[in-house]
Amino acid sequence: MSVVNAVPRLLAIGGRALLPALAIAALAASGPVAAQSAAQRAVDAAKKICSGKTITIVWEAGLQSLDPLNFSGPKWEQLTGCKVKVVEVPVAEMFTKIMQEYRAGTGAYDALNVIPAWMPDLAQAGALEVLDPYVDKYGFRAELQKIAPTYRDNQMMVGGKIYGFPDDGDVFVFYYRKDLFARADLKSAFKAKYGYDLAPPKTWKQFDDIGSFLTEKLKGEGIYGASMFREAGYGNFMFQERFRNEGGKFFDANTMKATINTPAGVKVLTEWRNENRFMPPGVEKFGFVENLAVFLQGQSAMTISWPPYGRFAAGYLSEEKALSWVPKSQIAGKVGYALPPGGHPELAAGFALSVASTSKQKEQAYLFIQWLNSEEISNQRVQLPYALRDPFRDSHFTNPGYLKLWPDAKDYLAALKAGANTGLLDLSLIQTDKYEEALRQGISRLWAGEDPKKILDDIARQWDETTQRVGVEKQKAVYNAWAAKSGAYPK
Amino acid sequence: MVASQADPLTPAARPGARDRGFKYALVAPSIFVLLLIGIFPLVYLLVVSFQNITMTDVDTSFHGLLNYRLLFHDQRLWEALLHTVIFIVIALPVELILGLLMAQLFIDRIPGRQVFIALLVLPVVVSPIVAGATWSLMFDNRFGPINQIIGWIAGEELTLLWTINPHLVYPAILVAEIWQWTPFMFLLLLAALSAVDKSQLEAASIDGAGYWRTFFRIVLPAIWPVMAVAILIRGLDLFRLFDIVWALTKGGPGTMTETISIFTYVKGFQQFDTSYTAAVALLIIVLLSVLVFWGLKRVELAR
């Protein structure tokens, strides 16, 4: 038995506690073969079994897919002779497409991008291939350990088996105009009015104070205190984050009765509606692009969004052709980064790389995703200016190249890392979309003027119906497994 | 045995029976294909509706009327049906009346008639999902021209959230729907009006009949068969209304504008409640069949 073969087996038996020691021992004992990177191992194996073939991968349409189209796909082909066909699917349709293909069993997709919250559904349906045997065969376990703990421990496995490699460190970041927050006239006026310093808010009460204050002072200059995602699809993530920061729990862990309609939930929806007074008109419709446009044009002083906002705001590679749709940043060098109020940002959405169980080229597909996800290649991918993949490995946050990409990149990466450390997972159950759909519909009803308590009571009723339909005990087991994860609720 | 040796009285020996057999043999393949693509899916749908196939469980065991019981207690389903009826009841008469008025306008040989007709028909050739997306931009509160124009008229900047405000969302969808499909009515009715017997109109005029009397006694009976078919086609189209609503509101706020088609899509293809969706689909098929049969009988085309 060679060391290369022995290490994965031992790792499988010994678990994480043995990993560092075994990895070091393996590296020391095995010479050039074991020292080879996971990326190179994937390349070498793919040359033998994938050269001349084509694998198909599902990727989010738009900027995300420029990664495999412009960078990783061509590079993989150059290295291995294996072609990559990219099927672009809008994120709202990805789950449907993946499930439809699985049910049809055509084998049209080999590798998949999967939002981690979908994993229990897809795994239970049988749509995803268990990756553990491949991980062991191609010696990837040690590199998987170097994924940032939040993503590694929470977004990789279902029932103790690996179904996907976390590949996108999505986390909400609080962005604020540090030039405005540093203005002497505003600082003194704010201190005089509220009795504390003008600084990034730690609580939603402070956020309300600062937002209304800045709107009062700066509206004449065309600047609102804040702008936020309010459109229901995005609001879903915002609600999940804030509800838990306010102490809310989604369910009673014993009875599985929905507890979203508790005072914490009512408080969030009531405050949301109230906060709109210091945001741009029509904020109720703000999604990713609308909010981005307002923030980059300098029309709002605070916002919360995914990491690309920080890169776009810094004007990092704004000449890139693929980014021509992004409004030119008027605020480059003026943006500060922090944790959102409450201190526990949503690890909203994200992507993991998986292999389709119906694929006829599972091994080939696996090798491609191992290579993509590897330390070496992922470090390059997260720096692509157009591809929207955010840092998710420990090494990404300290990558010397990344730290120098723009003057504030160090602060940006520090904020992302802090967010990853304290972030909260999206709710993930059986039939997650039914629960999220009820929430999305509830948020849109809020903007239509309905009463928050009535909305949340309706959501709770729908959640309970869904739980009944799935089976209380079955869902309870999944929920409790999810709730036991480190990022489920603030610790 | 050959034909010449057969009993001359047996059916196979009779030339008429042979011809009939040959005819049946000729049409049999097409009947088989029709059954395969028409009846088999229906039967399969029926079977699936009695099972319990969901996203995570492919449970093909017989579950009796489980899905039908759920269906009759599903408030959202009946609300979706109600919303669909609201769209039909408002949009259909408006499209009909506007289409008729436009057809009346263009029945006379006015200058530029052909060009105007071609321009007026353009919305019909646009894909409904594209039309919906375009109207979504038109109604946008920041960049859309509609709010700007209303703002100019009102003399102040207005933020009308057409796809969120419950008072505006139905008008917004109906405007888009009527804009797209009135030309369809117009085209059919223009063709029907062109075929009205001119001599009858002249006779009515000579007899001193007024405009309305002529319209109700001569024109309407003459164009009724075409009009009835147009109403039927548009009625069925509106029953399966999806694209424009999806592009504008996705059925929201909440489920306020959710149509039966959107409901079915969400249940079937987003949440993969396959068996339940099969039951819903069967309900729709029954409802539509009754409606179509009734409609065809009304216009005496069923015979």
Image (tube, grey):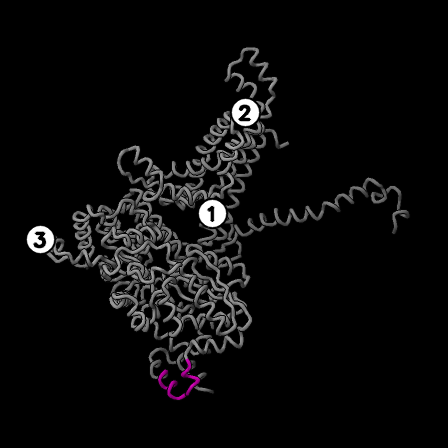
Residue placed under numbered mark 1 in the picture:
B264
Left or right of A12? Residue A100 is right
The magenta stretch spans residue A316 = no
Q: Position of residue B256 (x, y in %)?
A: 38, 42
The residues tagged by marks 3 and 1 sit, at their Cα atoms, a distance apart of 58 Å
Counting labels gives 3
Residue placed under numbered mark 3 in the picture:
A192
At x 44% / y 78%, what residue is drawn?
A: A40
Quadrant of the rendered image containing residue A159: bottom left
Identify the mark at residue B109; answer none if there is no mark.
Answer: 2
Q: Position of residue A191 (x, y in %)?
A: 10, 55
Residue type, mark 1 in image: Thr
The residues tagged by marks 2 and 1 sit, at their Cα atoms, a distance apart of 46 Å
- Mark 3 neighbour density, 10 Å: few (under 14) some (14–19) many (20 or more): few
Query: Is B299 rendered above or below residue A149?
Result: above
Residue type, mark 3 in image: Ala
Residue B278 visible in the picture: yes
